[in-house]
Amino acid sequence: MIKIAVYGKGGIGKSTTVSNVAAALSKQGLKVMQIGCDPKADSTITLRAGKELKTVLDLERAGAPYTLDDMVLEGFNGVICVEAGGPTPGLGCAGRGIIAALEKLEEKRAYEKFKPDVILYDVLGDVVCGGFSMPMRAGYADKVYIVTSGENMAVYAAANIAMAVENFKDRGYASLGGIILNKRDVEEEESRVETLAKDFKTEITGILPHSEYVPKAEKMGKTVIEAFPESSMAKAYAELAKALIK
């Protein structure tokens, strides 16, 4: 079982990237589980075709008994979708949903039931502390990948995440697998991200072009892999998916 955590600042296209990678891996014949670790609980939305999925934190808050089937939903091409959820805005710790989700998936033996070949954790990475660091911990992800563009704030956030991974490595946490460049076509974009990768002794694992297919697919409520399977963007996601599990 391959376990990958994908981090990146809010709005950088992280969830879009993870969902398309999940879809691409499923089309390559692998059983995939995607765990959304963002309080917005929208990580798997383009995989679910509009179907409602209760977050783990919502189920916990309800106080009633619930089963594994209440926590998960089978999405596009069999991708198993889970959303950790978050607190009421302004109240509580956003990392609590991540902790609850990962603990409950283990408690309810999700991995034994679904037997995923690949687990993808989609994690908001503006901060890497408390529950947000949990997917990096021993027993969860094996590798961390960081999504960034060449924009100043994205590179700054990516460097902070990479530093956190570096600082946690002595605890047996996941190691840094590489950087995913999600292009915004800003000046000197590739060279800036190459410098970032070099600073942390890693590599650019994949480069995703800025494409009109992404917003078109999202408007349809689908991944690019589902909506435009023959497009150049779908091929870029498929190549990235292969690189991540190589």
Image (spheres, grey):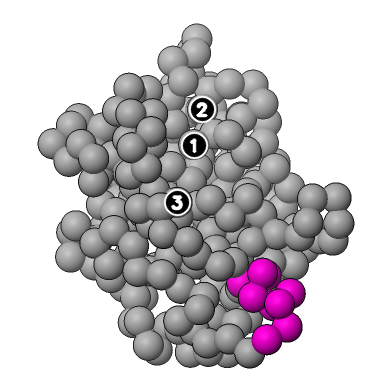
Q: Nearer the viewer, residue 77 or 52?
A: 52
Number of residues whose C-alpha sits closer than 10 Å to that of mark 2, classed few (under 14), some (14–19) or many (20 or more)? many
Give the residue displayed 71% in from the left and 77% down from the top.
Answer: 62
Q: Tell me if label 2 and label 1 are in contact, CB under 8 Å.
A: yes
Residue 73 left/right relative to 146: left
Question: What whole-number distance in Å separates the C-alpha atoms at marks 3 and 1?
Answer: 13 Å
6 up-or-down from 113: above or below: above
- Please state the horizontal and vertical placement of residue 226, each as a whole percent of the image: 23, 46
Number of residues whose C-alpha sits closer than 10 Å to that of mark 1, classed few (under 14), some (14–19) or many (20 or more)? some
Of the numbered discs in the image, which one, if any, rests on residue 183?
none
Of the numbered discs in the image, which one, if any, rests on residue 13?
1
Q: Nearer the viewer, residue 61 or 165?
A: 61
Within the image, what quadrant is residue 131 found in? bottom right
Q: Nearer the viewer, mark 2 or mark 1?
A: 1
Is residue 57 visible in the rendered image? The answer is: yes
Give the residue displayed 19% in from the left and 57% down from the top.
Answer: 27
Q: Nearer the viewer, residue 138 or 202?
A: 138
- Please state the horizontal and vertical placement of residue 54, each as a whole percent of the image: 56, 67
Return the disc, 2 or 3, that comes first in the chain's sequence: 3
Q: Which stretch did the figure color magenta?
A: 56-64
Return the disc, 3 or 1, that comes first in the chain's sequence: 1
Secondary element at tag 2:
loop
Mark 2, residue position? 149
Label 3 is placed on what type of residue? Ile
